[in-house]
Amino acid sequence: MKLFHNAKFYSMRKEGEFFSAVLVNNDKIVETFNKTPELQNVEYIDLQNCFVYPGFIDTHTHSFEGGLYSLGADLEHVSSLNDVFEILSETKPISGKIFAFHFDENKIKEKRFPTNKELDKIFPDLPVILRRVDGHSCVVNSIAVKKIKWEKPLPKFFSGHLNKRWNGIASTWFHQNLSDEAILDIYLKAAEKAIKTGHTTIHTMIGDAHSDLMHYRLIKKNLHRFPVEFILYPQITDIKQALEIGSPRIGGCIVADGSFGSHTAALLQPYKDEPENYGVLYKTDKFWEDFIKEAHLNNLQIAIHCIGDAAISQILKFYEEVQRENPKDLRHEIIHNELCSDKMLDRMQKINISSVMQPMFDRLWAGKNGLYEKVLGKERTLRTNRLASIYQRGILITGGSDWYITDLNALKGINAATKMHNKNERLSSYQAVKLYTSNAAKLSFDENRLGIIEKGYQADFVCLENDIFQIEEINKIKINKVVKKGI
Ligand SMILES: [Zn+2]
Ligand SMILES: [Zn+2]
């Protein structure tokens, strides 16, 4: 047995509760103490005055892409196309392909995507994919175009840039045909990064709704090999298949709509900067109605990507229908839930919908002259990322990074949640930590096992240099140690 001591252990069961020492047997907490006890035959582990929280849980990541892209070219900090080309020319292929991500044309001086011809100059023989920061569009080079099997001819005046369905086909092709070993390596990379940033569990989306299960079976079989616990989401819409693989849930970022940056998030009122454009609902009411009804009937927890208010209201309508006819505790998820009204939140509360939020979206896109104001206008920007409004209604609200879209870093998410641009939507630091601990555990029905430091719970901790509840710059706190299952 081990006694972790000399630290302040916040239980996260109720506000203000903490312990001074925690006794762990194998992977479980067996006792908590308000004073360090003197015990026989116990290994004492001195945590040197740090602050301990339940291990962070990120409830929304794309770990495969995150892991893959951390092996590829990161274009987050480029300021010109020349920078892009320079980084690309030094990038090593993974299974014979070049991956680049985090590209944002608005952040470089040319304000445009590179073309396929420009990419061909650097890589005439290797397929290249350069993905936009939101993942909703990409650029590919000529050899990639040749190799990918397209369903119909490419758009006229094609210069390498692809969005909507084209983007899905291209990224799926790039993600396929990797060896099992390469895939496991990529997930291992993701798991290592998760632990390093204080997480002990992360929810990860697998595959995409347009293709097959991709690595679901492989990862499920190898779960024990990773230092972090993965909660898996098969991103499919085939219910039979989800049941066959024994998944308790279905979906993830299976998309009801697109993104604000690509003007494809579905809106009830048009885009401010494109007055004719209402965005895109990717699927019909009939499709979602059938899917949600059948999944609910089969006791699958459903998760769907909804960004704009039109997408949220499309999905909410069918969630309401199934919960009204046949109420169950399945905690169906709306992922992102980015733009919504008070009324919609009231409706979510009534039928126990879970809201999987990304507080970092506010850091990236809210604020004066930010993306939200540009595409939605001031008034609607006030209705984005409504953390406090959701929390106050008692809706299950959890935090996630949507990694690779934002960094896999719960401290950044917690920090962002306490500093939302709209003051009315700010959470207290205690509430914000709940999004990544006790609330997050509930999303996967693990509230009796994870997310709290208490007798009987799994010994998953993150040990920090400073106290989240006392410090302003939460994102800068140093992580001293992460304990997963007592180790
Ligand atoms: Zn999404
Ligand atoms: Zn996502």
Image: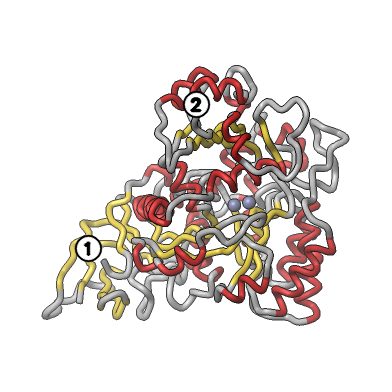
What amino acid does circle 2 point to?
A: Phe
Task: Look at the numbered disc 1 and give the secondary structure of its residue.
Answer: strand
Q: Which residue is mark 1?
A: 6
Depth order, front residue of 270/96 = 96
Label 1 or label 2, whichever lies nearer to me, is: 2
Does the beta carbon at disc 2 come under 8 Å from ligand 2? no
> In the image, what residue occupies the spot 39% across and 69% down?
11
Which residue is most to the right? Answer: 276
Q: Assign the N terminus to one quadrant of the image.
A: bottom left
Which mark, by number, is residue 123? 2
Whether pointer 1 and pointer 2 mark residues with C-beta atoms closer than 8 Å, the reply is: no
Task: Look at the numbered disc 2 and give the secondary structure of its residue.
Answer: loop
Q: Position of residue 44 (x, y in %)?
A: 16, 69
Q: Is residue 86 visible?
A: yes
Depth order, front residue of 308/93 = 93
Q: Position of residue 253 (x, y in %)?
A: 63, 55
Q: Position of residue 466 (x, y in %)?
A: 33, 50
Q: Is residue 132 visible?
A: no
Q: Is residue 331 left or right of residue 177?
A: right
Q: Is residue 341 left or right of residue 221?
A: right
Depth order, front residue of 388/377 = 377
Q: Earlier in the sequence, mark 1 or mark 2?
A: 1
> In the image, what residue occupies the spot 58% across and 35% down?
144
Structural distance between the alpha carbons of marks 1 and 2 = 55 Å
Say few, some or many: other residues with alpha carbon within 10 Å of mark 2 (under 14 / 14 to 19 / 20 or more): some
Which mark, by number, is residue 235? none
What amino acid does circle 1 point to?
A: Asn
Q: Is residue 428 left or right of residue 5?
A: right
> In the image, what residue occupies the spot 58% across and 29% down?
141
Q: Quadrant of residue 87?
A: top left
